[in-house]
Every structure is written in C-alpha cells, then in structure tokens.
Amino acid sequence: MKNKIFEFLDLGNQPLANSYIKKKDLNKKERMYRLVVRYNNLNKLVSIKKTFSSKDMFNNEYPYRSSTSQTMSLHLKKLAQNIKKKMPTKILEIGSNDGCFIKNFDKKKTIGVEPCTNVEKITKKQKYNTYPEFWSPTLARKILKKHNKVNLIFSSNTISHIKNLDEVFEGINIILDEKGIFIIEDPSLLECLKKNTYDQFYNEHIYVFSYLSLQNALTKHNLEIFKIEELKIHGGSNRYYIKKITNKIKLHKSVKHHKYKERKFGLENLKTYIKFAKRIEYSKKKLLSIFIRCKKNNKKIIGYGATAKSVTILNYCNINNKMISYFVDTTPDKQNKYTPGTKILIKKDSNLINDKVDYAFLGAWNFKKEIFNKEKEYIKKGGKFIVHTPYPRIICK
Ligand code: TMP
C-alpha cells in the first residue's frame, strides 16, 4: 500500500498552546499557525501537520506542573507503589516535570530527564538526579557513562510530544537493560475519537497514539508492546508496557483485546477520521450556540482550568473574552496571565458563589471529578458547567 497522508481535520489558526500572555505583552502580535490533523494509512499514525522545534515549546518558561492536580499525583503514586513491589534497581523518567513520579522513589534509584529548566530546578533542588536536557541517543550514552543500564523507563505524556520517534526509541535501546521494561502513558486515540476530544490536538501533541501506530513505530527498533492498561486519566489514556523483542515475556491478552477494539472501531480506515471531523464541525457550532444563548440571557461565564487543550477549543470555536469573564487555574505560572489567542485573564482562584458565576466552562474536563468535588457548594447553589465532551452541553453532575 502506498504511504498516503490524509489531512482530515482543520482546527483553524491557533497560537502555541502553552504561551500564556503577560499583561505587558497583550498588544504584541502572537505567533499563530494552522492546526491541521492527518492520518497516515501506512503506519496508522495520527499527527499534526505543522510542528515547532522542541526548544520553542519546552523552555525555561514552561508553565505546566504535573503535581498541581491531586488526581495526577495519586495516579502516579499508585503506579510507583506497584513498581516498587517489583524492586527495580534503577528507574529513568523521560519528562520528569516537577518530580510528581520520581518523588515516590529513593533518590539513589532514579534519574530524571526534563528539558524545561524552570521545572527541572524543582527536582534538582530536592537533590534528585535530573538532567535538564532533551531525550536523545546522545543523552542516553551520556547517562550510561555515569550509571549502569536501567531496568525501568517511564514516560507519561511526553513521547507524543517528540517528533522524531526513531531517536526516542534508539535512545531507549541504548540505556534499557535486556530484561528491562519501558512504560509509556499517553492519550488514547480510540478514546479521543469516541469522546470527540479534538482538544487533544495542539502544537505540543504531535501525535495521538493508537496501539496500532505505536507498535508500528516500535517494530523498527525491535521493541514490542506486551501489555496495555486502559486508564481514565486525561480523559482516556493507554499505559503501554514495552520490552525488547529478545526478552521472552509472554504477550498479555490485553494486547490482542485492545488491538481488536481499535480495528473494530475503524482506526485503520480513513472513513472513521472523516466522520470524526464532521462530528467536530457540529460540536463547534453547538458549543458556540450554548455560549451565545447564555450571554443573550446575561449569564456570567468563567473558565475552569486554563488547559493547553482548551486553547484549541476556544480558538477553533471563536469563544473569546467577551464570552468568558476570566479563567481560574491552580498553576502559579499561568496565573495573572492571559490565555493564548483569546486573551482571557487567568486568576488564581475565585469564589464562584460570591462572584455570581452562572456557568463555568470546564477547560480541565479531564479532572472533572476532582473539580466537582471542590465546587460542591457552587453546584448545590445552582452553579453549572459547560462541557464539550462527548458533545457540548450544560451539566451539574
Ligand atoms: P492538563 O489538562 O493539561 O493536565 O491541565 C490541567 C489544568 O487544570 C492545570 O493548569 C491545572 C488546572 N486545574 C485547576 O485549575 N483546578 C483543579 O482543581 C485541577 C484539578 C486542575
């Protein structure tokens, strides 16, 4: 079959998702690009067309902190506890962020790799062994000069951010012990399509993986997925357990099962992606009409969780600072700044009840449970949320 790439979804002009704007820069021209999503019918990869250099996206101003969500902290703690039972001697994390995962282990046992120096500083200060560099075969060799091979490599929501997958896996092969395990967690393409979460696409998410596409990329490097766990985190992710092909661990039944589900849903057919794009066009109209109706009725709407994902939604649907009064977000580096493209102020917190908020647009829909728990009183007093997934609607539970 010919290697054909089909562009199936155009999410319009977008700013870089994590480039929150400082007040003094509000009148400066933002860097914009066209967000187009493609499907490759040979290797089954779904990727964005226009990409930026890693240095442009992951630098000393990167605002994201894994630890700001209790859900994420607990999720990684649970995994760490399970790993500890298997008593690995050396663990490497690619994209260690603020140490949300490695902090669960003995400092002597872990190596972190985190290119955003403002975030890496946090773990360095706590005396964790972290490298403020991008993952590459060169870095793998450099680490190997100082340490032995590692038995476990973990990477959460990072591999899908790296354009050159061949380099990623080449590096893995250099540093991973022959009997070692590589664990990747990333958003699931199947869940993205099922839940219409087109906001999984933004400049940092170069790929949204399926089992089918990830295994294709791994095969070239003699790496193999031997187990898959379907996770609720981030609105539906997969945890892929990967081994070297020479390691004779038996394939878990979850691999066959997940592969079957992806094929049955049509992840190998272009038609599936075209249908998805049609649903997204409808989703845009519907979401915008909810905002327009609420504003006509003089309702106050704020945004809850100024996520990178919500940047895609707001810019695609033309929802601006006339519709959303402000955002609230717990991340210090986002606070007192403005959302990219739409220029909506981000506040530290707000008392939704005293501030007479009628609706909160749930930017951090992936942490709905945690947020609804926090905002029990608001909901009790009649406060509502606007969501876009699986279809745009107003909810209170
Ligand atoms: P993410 O979806 O990219 O992980 O980002 C989640 C964002 O939501 C992050 O900026 C923190 C924010 N957030 C809140 O503001 N309040 C909350 O209660 C939670 C769970 C997250």
Image (cartoon, rainbow, N blue to C red):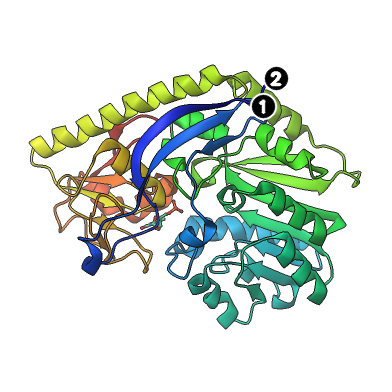
Q: Is residue 238 left or right of residue 298?
A: right
Residue 59 placement, left or right of 26? right
- Residue 201 shows up from this direction: yes
Q: Secondary structure at mark 1?
A: loop
Image quadrant of residue 174?
bottom right
Q: Secondary structure at mark 2?
A: loop
Q: Amino acid at mark 2?
A: Met
Measure how far apart labels 1 and 2 are at the Cα level: 7 Å
The location of residue 250, given as percent across then percent down, is 87, 39
**Count of marks overlaid on the render:** 2
Q: Residue at x 75, y 72 (%)?
A: 109
Amino acid type at image mark 1 = Leu
For image coordinates 46% across by 31% down, the residue present is: 195
Q: Which mark is residue 1?
A: 2
Q: Position of residue 19 (x, y in %)?
A: 37, 59
Q: Which mark is residue 42?
A: 1
Furthest residue in direction top, as rendered: 271
> At 14% across and 52% down in the image, what residue appears?
356
Q: Nearer the viewer, residue 33 or 185?
A: 33
Q: Do the residues under discs 1 and 2 have CB atoms within 8 angstroms?
A: yes
